[in-house]
Amino acid sequence: MIWLIHVLNGIAIGMLLFLLAAGMSLIYGLMKILNLTHGSFYLVGGYIGLTVMQRTGSFVLALLAAAAVIGVAGAVIERFFLRRFHFDELPQTLITFGFLFIFADASLWIWGGDPLMLRQPRMLAGSLPLGDYGYPYYRFFLIGVGLAFAAALWWFQEHTRLGTMLRAGVDDAEIARALGINVSLLFTLVFAAGAAFAALGGVLAGPVLSYYPGADFDALILAFVVVIVGGLGSLRGALAGALLVGLLDDFGKAFFPQFALFTVFVPMALILVVRPTGLFGRR
Amino acid sequence: MIALAVDNLSKNFGGVAALAGVSLEIGVGERRVLLGPNGAGKTTLFHAISGTVLPSSGRIGLFGHDITRLRADRRARLGLARTFQITNLFPRLTVLDSVLLAVGGADGRPLEPLRPMWSYRRRYDQAHVLLEQWGLAATARRIVRNLSYGEQRQLELVLALAGEPRLLLLDEPTAGLSPAETARVVEMVQRLPREMTILMIEHDMDVAFELADRIAVMHQGRLIAEGGEAEIRADPRVSEIYLGSE
Amino acid sequence: MKPRIEVLAACAVVLVLLLVLPDVVRPYYVGLATKMLIFALFAMSLDLLLGYTGLASLGHAAFFGTAAYTIALLTLRGGVTSWVAFPTSLAVATVTGGLVAVLALRARGSYFLMITFALAQVVWSVAFGWRSLTNGDDGMPGVPRPDFGWSLDGATPFYYFTLAVFAVAALLLAAIVSSPFGYALRGIRDSETRMQALGYDVWRYQFVAFVLAAAFAGLAGALYAYLNRFVSPDDLHVIQSAEALIMVILGGAGTLFGPAIGAALIVFLEDYVSSMTEHWLMVLGAIYVLVTLFAPRGLVGLVTTHLRERSGP
């Protein structure tokens, strides 16, 4: 029975990772931007959700507020800072990294250095008895949300014109514009959406993980591992990678707590040796 | 003696057959031109010969060596050189530095990390001679990305020649050039030593007929005609793909 | 290209200034200058990878910190002399560099960046998590100054020691960069496929460049451990790698001494800003953004572009 608990944990964490990695993969697939601020979007989104929850007691409001604020922040960053560096790796790296530092310092300033946790929404409190243990309903909720999100994204990619474009990757802005697509707006929207997904992940993670200075780096690294394993620019890869990493992370923490990162990184290294662009990656 | 032997070469990309069973043989010193409409597979064939792309099946022999799966730099060291259809130079280096690199490349020397470059007098001399010979001496200190398109195409050629290759692959050397610049390139190619084997992709029929000993025509990944100028001009299949499709 | 006489003259002037520095400034600044030299070396080592070979690594601190920890572990736990510890730390950094290179060079561009980041964090996680070996977050204090026969305990003697090591390392780097190997690296930076077509074994060059960069970074790390008499996981953290990156960009990638200037500036700014506010991280982040937006080729880049444009094609 304990195995089932760990598997469920792994999947739940995997779903959070998927929310994070999907945004990163989407942004990369379209704009070739490796967004290093992504971990900050996750953490600050979580902090914002926490504050809203503390003031209003509403989980839904917390989710909406975090997504909105971070979405706007993402749009601003893309529009005013990253716009001219599309497809130019080093400047993007530096700018998104700069924002990572700025957000990190600002959140330390505003929310302090102690680990904080989000209270579980009352509706989802309680647990399902599984053998000798009780498994929290909230984690089932996470798994459900993750699956719904994956399904929604998949449908969007396959069945809308916008989705097809995202899938193909807009390599030639001129042609895209000729087809009547407002490329600039598209880029800003996708970046904002990716940021919002990360923020939602941050809020959803609250009852399960805690918010602390450095969680942004930790989240970023795990997101990296997910896209390295699954492949940049592929949603299927993000899901596969996220589940794999979630399971490895959970088992690692349970059985080798001091070297938890190793159980995640060793498979990553192996995949790198065999398929440097990830399981489902394309150049 | 055979310089290049391509044997039943095929390359598939996803479901598309870019090359379908291409075979040809080029003798040492021959000038062969590859003609064919866009998408015929000419550049793919070049990529397979130069090592940029690995074929799905078939064999390639260079001066008797099987190079089918050999790494690109090893092929260069066996005497193969190429120019690229889309100019592939060193944008931030000077013309002189680019040629110095080209001169130092083909002999596969060890890494030489400590002696300064300016002490290698022989390389500098070789580089200056090359630049002089091919009319780029005045641009030696200029940065490559500041050169005109025509000058860049010339440099493409000079880089390929620097290693004194035995087989030279020219990928559309006159693409995008003015008539005067085209004539220059034709003259450059005609000046090349007769022992050098040349395989060239060309779109300009006049240039092709002027430079070629023999012509090979490709269409949809296949070699459909081969021969001298008269045979090709008379071949109905060739006129069909060039005139019929227009 | 023989170095211009102006460049050699400038170097001579700087060297003289550095030599008389301890007589001219307060003792505190001697320590700061030592730190500047160490980070100048660290940044120059990264520039070999970034500015010359075109490989942007976010994990360079791994080699810096590994050497630092090797010094600490060998001298504090192993009771080994400096004659052994110092070279060993370089060897460890170099070997680590080789291992990371083998994995990271399987990829390019964004993947390369992520992989170097991730692998460096693995190393960090070992330093952080293996408390019985490294004391984890508390770090390892009490690292003695090197003992090569005369005392380096004072700020000034250690400064001269660092200056000497820096000068030798800088000369080596200058030699590497102006050799055919260095030229080849730049060719690879500009076009891997072109270099391949010219007959160069690109992977071998990149591998050697990576290992050399790791070795010089290790040298800087060892000096840092001696300077602070202390090592901690922060020496290995990605923030350290990122700081090195901005030092290179600020000074000018691919200009050999630009990164040294960038490093000196960042070390100075950090010292100055930290004395006024706790929010150095935010300021650093702002510097990143501003430098990238307004001086993408760095300060030295701005100057050389000016000079080149004035002297004509």
Image (cartoon, helix red, strand yellow):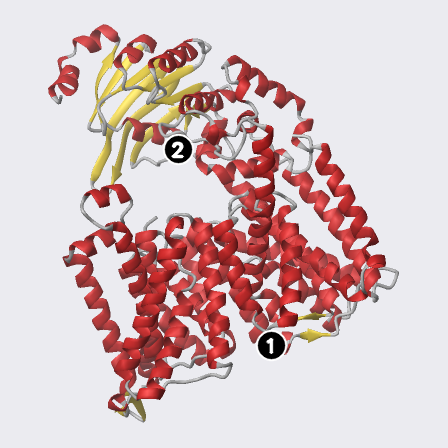
| A45 displayed left or right of C62 | left
Between B223 and B84, the one nearer to me in the picture: B84
The image quadrant that residue B53 belongs to is: top left
Rendering coords of residue C281 (x, y %)? 55, 68
The answer for which chain carries disc 1 is C
Rendering coords of residue C264 (x, y %)? 67, 56
Rendering coords of residue A197 (x, y %)? 30, 69
User: Callout 1: few (<14), some (14-19), or many (20+) C-alpha neighbours within 10 Å?
Assistant: some
Between B207 and C70, the one nearer to me in the picture: B207
Residue pictured at 15% horizontal, 15% vertical: B239
Residue pictured at 48% horizontal, 69% vertical: A262
The answer for which chain carries disc 2 is B
Query: Which amino acid, by three-letter code, is at mark 2?
Result: Gly
| A75 displayed left or right of C295 | left
- Rendered position, B98 above or below A174: above
Between C240 and A77, the one nearer to me in the picture: A77
How many badges with numbers are in the image?
Answer: 2
State the residue position of label 2. Answer: B51
Query: Which amino acid, by three-letter code, is at mark 1?
Result: Asp
| A275 displayed left or right of B193 | left
- Rendered position, C119 above or below B100: below
Residue that protrudes farthest toward the left in the picture:
B244
Q: Is the C terminus of chain B in the top left, top right, bottom left or bottom right quadrant? A: top left
Q: Are marks 1 and 2 in contact (CB under 8 Å)?
A: no
Residue pictured at 14% horizontal, 17% vertical: B243
Can residue B206 be seen? yes
The image quadrant that residue A188 belongs to is: bottom left
Rendering coords of residue B119 (x, y %)? 69, 27
Can residue A14 be seen? no
State the residue position of label 1. Answer: C137
The image quadrant that residue A253 belongs to is: bottom left
Instruction: Look at the numbered disc 1 and give the secondary structure of its residue.
Output: helix
